[in-house]
Amino acid sequence: MNNYYQKVFKKVLSLAGFIAVLLAISTPSVEGQWNGSGSITDPYEIHSVADLNMLASNVNAGNSYSNVYFKLMRDIGIVTQMIGDDVNYFAGHFDGDNHKITVNINSNATNVGLFSQTSGDIESIIIDGSVVGGNGSQNIGGIVGQMLSGHVHFFTNLAEVTGAGPTSSVGGIVGIAICGYGGDIGISGCTNNATITGGQYVAGIVGRAYSIGGSLVVRLSRNAGTIKGNGTSVPADLKSYIAGIVSHFGNAGHMLLHGNTNIGKILSSNFNYVGGIVAFSEGVFIYSCSNAGILEGAKNYVGGIVGWLYADRLEGCINTNWIDLGTAQNYGAIVGLNNGVVTNCYYDSQMCAIGGINNQYMQGQAEGLPTTSMLGSNLQNLLPIDWIFENNLYPRTIYYSNHPVVLLAAAPIYLQNVGTIMERLNYVTQPFTVSNWNPNPGPWQIPFEYWWGWYPGGNFIPSSMMNYISVPPPTSSTATILVPRGGWDSLSVRLNYPTYNYNGFYTGYTIIFEKIVPINVRP
C-alpha cells in the first residue's frame, strides 16, 4: 500500500472512531446494558423502549431486582411488553421522574399492567395509551396488575384500562393489592383521569384491596374518570362492586382510606354495591374523603361515600352530588348500609336529592345541610383538621388542595329558595343559578380554566345555544349561568390544561366533570 492510500485509510479509521464516539455519547444505553450502577445515588437509567424491554425480559427471566434502583430519563412509548408475569415480579425501586410512558398492553395473563406484579417501590410515572386484560385475566391496572407489597406513589393515569372477564378486578392504578404476603402496602398521591371498565371489582384507583395481616393504606388519591361495567355478566352466585377509589376493601390487618377525592361518574346499574369512595369495606378506618361524582344506580347497596360499611369507622366525610338509586333497597347520601360507626359526615341536601337514609342502622349518623351551610367555614368545627375552608367553596382536603380534581370537587352549585321552599335537585320548579370558582395562581402555579357548560350525549352545545362560560385566571374569580328549568341532560365542567408541566398533564388534556345528571323537573 503506497503512502497516499495509507494516509486515506488512517483518515477513514479516525473518522469511524470519531463517529463511534458520537454514537456512544448520543445513545445513553444499548441493548444488554444500562447507564448507572443501580444504586440509590446512581440508578440504572431508562432512556428508551429497548431499555424498558430489557428490564421486562430480565424480570420475566427471574431477576426481581430487589433493592436495585432505576430511573426513567425521558418520555417513551409505545410499550407493549409487561414487566413481570404471573410467576415473576419486580421488587426494585423505579422512579419515573414525572415522565410519560405510552403503553399498548393487551394480554390474557392473570395479572396485567405495565408492571404485571410488584413488591417494590414505584413512583412518579404518567401512563397514557391503553391496558386491556382478556377474558382469562383477573387483575388489571394501569400501573400494576397485582401488588404484593411495597409502595406506589404519585402516578397519573391517562390510559383506558379494561378487564374483559366477568370476574376481573380492575383499577386505574392497581388491579388488586394483597397485603400480608410480602409486607405492608402504601398507595398514595395517585390520580386517574381515564375510563376504567371491569367485571366484578372496578374502581378508579384500586380494583380490590385486602389484607391478611400488615398495613394497607390508600390515601390522598383522586379519581376523575368514568367507572363502569364491561357488560359481561358476573356469575349469579357472586357479588359485584364499583367505586371511585377502591371497590372492595377488607379483611384483617391495619387498613386505612384517607384524604381521597372522587369526581368521576360511577355507572353502576348492574352492580350489587356502589360507593363514591368504596363500595364495600370491612375493618377499614375511612376519614376525610370527599365525593362530588355522580352515582348512577345499583342493584342493592348505594352510598355517597360507602355502599356497605361493615365493622368499620367512618369519620369526617362529605358528599355533594346526585345519586340515582336504581333498584337499590339500601341507600344513603353517605352510607347505603351501616354496620359500623359513622361520625361527623355531611351531605348537600339540595344536590343529593335522595335525602337521608333508608335503612334501620343509619338514623342520625350523617347530616344533610343546604348548600350554603356547607360552604366556607361552616363545617370548620365539625370536620377533622386536615381540610381547607374557603368562602364560596365546599371544604377540600388540605393535601393537594390546588389539584384540579380537588378544586372541582369543591365547586358548588346553588339552587334558589322559592319563598319558604328550599329547592332540591329533584324538585326544581324555577330557574336557578350556577356558580364557578377559579383560583388566583401564584408565580409558581400554571393557570388553567374552568368552563361550565351543557354536555348532553358527549358533546358541548355550541355557544349559540345556552353558552358555556370561560373563566380565565387571574382576572376573574366567579361566573354565573342562569339555567332555565328542564330540557338539558346534564351540567358539566370542562377543565383544560394549557401547558405541559402542571401536575404532569399534557397540552390539550381535558377532564369532563358532570355536576348534575338528568334532572326530573316538575312541569
Image (tube, rainbow, N blue to C red):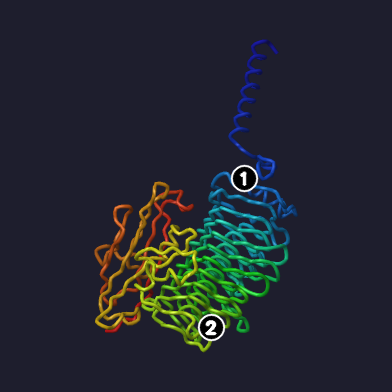
Question: Quadrant location of residue 178?
Answer: bottom right
Q: Quadrant of the N terminus?
A: top right
Residue 351 is left or right of residue 522, and the answer is right
Residue furthest to the front in view is 381
Which is closer to the viewer, label 1 or label 2?
A: 2
What is the spatial separation of the Cα atoms under label 1 and label 2, in whole angstroms?
A: 48 Å
Q: Is residue 45 above or below residue 458?
A: above
Q: Secondary structure at mark 2?
A: strand
Circle on res. 337: 2
* Amino acid type indicated by mark 1: Ile
Query: Which class describes the residues within 10 Å of circle 2: few (<14), some (14-19), or many (20+)?
Result: many
Where does the image place residue 365, in percent across and percent down from the top left? Answer: 49, 81
Residue furthest to the top in view is 3
Residue at 62 percent of width and 69 percent of height: 255
* Amino acid type indicated by mark 2: Leu
Say whether disc 1 or disc 2 marks the residue closer to the N-terminus: 1
Residue 460 is left or right of residue 83, and the answer is left
Query: Which class describes the residues within 10 Å of circle 1: few (<14), some (14-19), or many (20+)?
Result: many
